[in-house]
Image (tube, grey):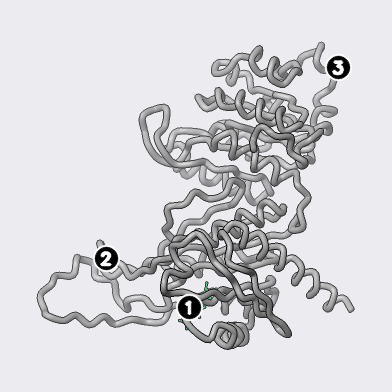
């Protein structure tokens, strides 16, 4: 619960940055949640943010004077800006405006908040909040990619109605979600330092401008795995087919439609990854041609010509510097035999197999898994996908450790 003291936030020092935007009013609620969770919170605002939220409110909530001015003799005497930069265990900027991100990317230091971001070695997370067109603008896309490449955690944004009347991506994540992300970032979990790429959801293979071949994967298992990994401290890239789920805060979300797009996105993201979990229900085949116009029902029968899609999991597993690879197998029968055959055929470290059909597997909240690796197998009992994902992640962590130990000896 948000109101409880959190073991990961208790007595941790959080520098809460606030830049100018309507969403700044939510920063008060975030500060309150962080305080309740037991954190020490120091608010630093950009000068323009003061137009959106009062210092008194934040000071009352955090019981500390709010810092803002870059040249402030009184505050500098109490705790200089370099001291403040060293003080922080985590810097969380919420909301982070387009202008804030642009200056951060450029390494500018013309406000106290930017100076602190530059001078601190603490993990830095930003929660973008801006108009959807500003978020989509190539300049912002470039800045966000650059920051991500430097290890800045981009939390959100969410999609939806905006204060300006528009609708689309650019809404700041809710304070509760940001609290959860801060907890995950400060939690030195068993996956700390691990870079993971997870695929999730279905793919859509277009037939014509309005139709596609798809499947019933909801993406729930893959999203739950991404969430469990984040909670254990991993850095997560989630490559997702079209689903109606919100990405867990802190995940780097790459949206794709087709198997070819997913293949390309994964091979790009896999670079220095330690772990690859292929949870997506990738279409094995795609129409050999995509009609440029809607296909008309002229004939009584219609034959579709399909071609094989690349096997993303097998291709990642075949890379010379490959990460630890986990695949899924959805089977209606002979679970263990098919899982082991798939493990060998794709050359992966672990297969998580589940039964599908008759109301099992897809579009349901619960699942059970049979885990098969080289030299063993074990079962995870039927339970909600979120708990199952936590157990799977903990099992993967054990297998990764075991493999490292074998390689070292
Ligand atoms: N997979 C993949 N790329 C594909 C197909 C599958 O990465 N083009 C991954 C899935 O994400 C999953 C595993 O491979 O981790 C499933 O393997 P697959 O052979 O597709 O399983 P099934 O679809 O169950 O295969 P089959 O229909 O032959 O049983």
Label 3 Cα crowd, 10 Å radius (few <14 / some 14-19 / many 20+): few
Mark 3: which secondary structure? helix
Name the N-terminal-most of marks 3 and 1.
Answer: 3
Above-or-below relation of 289 to 195? below
Q: CA distance from mark 2 to mark 3?
A: 65 Å
Front-most of residues 115 and 173: 173
| Residue to which mark 3 is pinned | 78
Label 1 Cα crowd, 10 Å radius (few <14 / some 14-19 / many 20+): some
Label 2 Cα crowd, 10 Å radius (few <14 / some 14-19 / many 20+): some
Q: Which mark is residue 319?
A: none
Q: In the image, what residue occupies the spot 66% across and 30% down?
A: 33
Q: Position of residue 183 (x, y in %)?
A: 70, 42
Residue 24: name its quadrant.
top right
Name the N-terminal-most of marks 2 and 3.
Answer: 3
Mark 1: which secondary structure? loop
Q: Which mark is residue 310?
A: 1
The residue most toward the right is 409
Q: Seen in the image, is 111 located left or right of residue 171?
A: right
Which is closer to the viewer, label 2 or label 3? 2
Residue 117: tell me if it is visible: no
| Residue to which mark 2 is pinned | 211
Q: In the image, what residue occupies the spot 71% across and 84% down?
A: 374
Which is closer to the viewer, label 2 or label 1? 2
What is the quadrant of the C terminus in the image?
Answer: bottom right
Name the N-terminal-most of marks 2 and 1.
Answer: 2
Q: CA distance from mark 2 to mark 1?
A: 21 Å
Q: In the image, is the residue at mark 1 within 8 Å of ligand 1 by its beta carbon?
A: yes
Q: In the image, what residue occupies the spot 37% across and 82% down?
A: 307
């Amino acid at each position: 619960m948000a109101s409880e003291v959190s073991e990961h936030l208790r007595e941790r020092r959080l520098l809460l940055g606030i830049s100018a935007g309507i969403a700044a009013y939510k920063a008060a609620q975030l500060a309150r949640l962080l305080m309740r969770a037991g954190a020490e919170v120091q608010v630093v605002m950009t000068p323009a943010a003061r137009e959106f939220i009062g210092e008194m409110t934040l000071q009352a909530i955090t019981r500390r004077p709010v810092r803002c001015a870059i040249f402030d003799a009184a505050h500098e005497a109490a705790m200089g800006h370099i001291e403040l930069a060293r003080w922080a265990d985590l810097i969380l900027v919420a909301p982070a405006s387009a202008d804030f991100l642009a200056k951060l990317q450029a390494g500018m230091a013309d406000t106290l908040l930017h100076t602190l971001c530059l001078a601190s070695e603490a993990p830095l997370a930003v929660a973008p909040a801006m108009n959807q067109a500003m978020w989509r603008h190539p300049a912002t896309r470039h800045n966000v990619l650059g920051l991500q490449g430097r290890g800045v955690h981009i939390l959100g944004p969410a999609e939806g109605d905006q204060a300006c009347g528009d609708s689309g991506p650019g809404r700041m994540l809710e304070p509760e979600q940001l609290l959860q992300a801060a907890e995950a970032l400060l939690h030195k979990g068993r996956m700390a330092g691990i870079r993971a790429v997870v695929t999730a959801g279905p793919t859509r293979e277009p037939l014509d401008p309005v139709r596609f071949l798809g499947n019933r994967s909801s993406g729930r298992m893959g999203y739950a795995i991404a969430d469990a990994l984040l909670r254990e401290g991993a850095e997560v890239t989630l490559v997702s087919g079209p689903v109606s789920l919100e990405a867990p805060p802190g995940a780097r979300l790459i949206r794709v439609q087709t198997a070819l797009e997913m293949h390309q996105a994964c091979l790009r993201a896999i670079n220095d990854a330690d772990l690859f979990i292929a949870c997506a229900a990738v279409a094995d085949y795609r129409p050999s041609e995509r009609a440029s116009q809607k296909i008309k029902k002229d004939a009584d029968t219609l034959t579709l010509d399909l071609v094989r899609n690349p096997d993303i999991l097998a291709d990642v597993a075949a890379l010379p510097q490959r990460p630890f690879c986990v695949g899924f197998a959805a089977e209606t029968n002979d679970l263990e035999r098919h899982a082991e055959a798939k493990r060998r055929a794709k050359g992966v470290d672990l297969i998580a197999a589940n039964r599908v059909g008759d109301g099992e597997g897809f579009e349901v909240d619960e699942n059970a898994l049979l885990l098969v690796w080289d030299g063993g197998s074990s079962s995870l009992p039927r339970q909600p996908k979120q708990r199952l994902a936590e157990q799977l992640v903990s099992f993967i962590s054990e297998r990764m450790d075991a493999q490292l130990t074998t390689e070292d000896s």
